[in-house]
Amino acid sequence: MNSTELFSRTSPMKLFFIASIPGAISMFASALYYTIEGIFVGHFLGSTAFAALNLAMPFVIINFSLADLIGVGSSVPISIHLGRGERTTANNIFTCACIMILVTGALIGAVLYAAAPFLMGLMGAQGEFAHLAVQYLRVYALCSPLTTILFAVDNYLRICGYIRGSLFINIFMSVLCVILEFTFLGILRFGIWGSALATCGGMAISSVAAFIPFFRGKALLRFCRPVFHMDMIRQIIACGSPTFLNNIAGRITSILLNTLLVRLDGEIAVSVYGILMFADGLIQPLLYGVCDSLQPAVGYNYGAGKYTRVRAIEKCCFAASALISLLSVVLIWLFPEEITRLFVADPEAEVLALAVFALRLFAFTYVTRWLSFATQSFMLAIGKPQPASILSVSTALVFPVLLVVLLWPLGLTGIWLNFAGTALLAAFVAVVLLKKHMKELLSPDLSPDLSPDPD
């Protein structure tokens, strides 16, 4: 569908179902693969490999965070410039951003490859545990230039109206990765490096496939002769900072918690924390898919001065996020044992009891998590990086570290309570930010709205 027609004319509710539902499905499909990867590693390679995967994963996500900085940071101004009819500027930002992602992917990958043994040792890992974590991280580091760009091109596809194309690419990647994962681990009996290679192979192939409309010159965005200038780079960094800071701060928190868990209860505690993160890894993409898929439409209409449509679209985002979160609370609370057994084959009674207890405390996170998540996405979509950054850093780093200190006397229980406490504090900050910007958010339209198409 023509993205201009889609963003400017389609009724907000219909737009939600056209863009947001496929976006949530595609993000869930990607997340489902990572869950399956954890299941395969835990069942084929054992608990030590599963713990090693979770120890290395924060650094893998840090590797993707710079690509997210540039990808998300460029998507916001691209959408706004398209809303203003400035296609030449949008094409230049798109072209420069792709080049920047490839270069930074290669540089960060090289650093992580060299530093992997030191990083795992710094976290307290030793012996086979550390060796497996280093193997896993180094494969991602080597493949970085071809994998980190995938999430950015997914944003560009949705900006151009390729909603189904984005959905297809994410499903294709997930299916391909699962096939490669099972082949490498279940049939060829590769080690943990085979798991990382399966993921990277699937992502690299999907990245090339996703760029086909742009290579052919059929998309709204076109490659052009790049013109780099500091104002554009500053704009990309500013708009991408909330997502980047959230990724970096969140991984710093994960590294801190993993380090504490290694010292408190060793591999068992790290494995339980990994189960929580895999559960979160299925829920967050649904929230992200619902909100992020509508960011191009929100940015386009904000750039065009159609604030009434912006508010109507965001009502759908907030309502859908709340529904997903509350359903997640119920499912995690009711089925903690089943979730645990997905990742740990025949868990010992001690492990099972600890995981069930942790999951039930963790479930309360989603009572309030939706509010801060939807608010951050909204602020980012309309080009308000400062409040979005405040919310992201508070959620990912400030509140978790503060609660680690305050809840330290409770031991492991304090760590499991950390997530729900962080979500509650973040929801309070979100309400404060929404009230602060309420006058601007209720601004009248600058141009007459176009009549929506019939439903």
Image (cartoon, grey):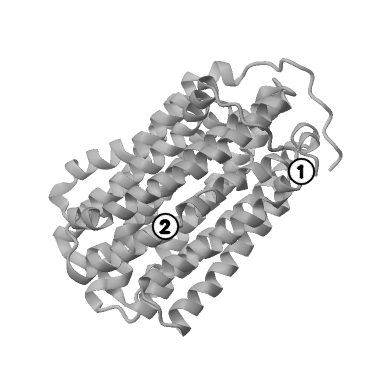
Lower position in the chain sequence, tag 2 or tag 1: 2
Real-space Cα separation, disc 2 to disc 1, in angstroms:
30 Å
Q: Which residue occupies 33% across, 69% down?
A: 50
Of 183 and 312, which appears nearest the observer?
183
Give the side of residue 125 with respect to residue 195, left or right: left
Res 324 visible: yes
Q: Which residue occupies 57% across, 33% down?
A: 74
Q: Which residue occupies 17% across, 64% down?
A: 265
Q: Could you say which quadrant of the image residue 451 lies in? A: top right
Type of the residue with mark 1: Gly
Q: Could you say which quadrant of the image residue 299 lies in? A: top right
Q: Position of residue 296 (x, y in %)?
A: 65, 36
Q: Counting other residues with Cα less than 10 Å from the Cα at mark 1, is it few (<14), some (14-19), or many (20 or more)?
A: few
Q: Secondary structure at mark 2?
A: helix
Quarter of the image with the C terminus is top right
Of 384 and 81, which appears nearest the observer?
81
Q: Counting other residues with Cα less than 10 Å from the Cα at mark 2, is it few (<14), some (14-19), or many (20 or more)?
A: some
Residue under label 1: 217
Give the side of residue 351 with respect to residue 293, left or right: left
Q: Is residue 73 above or below residue 192?
A: above
Q: Position of residue 206 (x, y in %)?
A: 61, 58
Of 239 and 420, which appears nearest the observer?
239
Q: Position of residue 226 (x, y in %)?
A: 62, 31
Q: Position of residue 145 (x, y in %)?
A: 49, 50
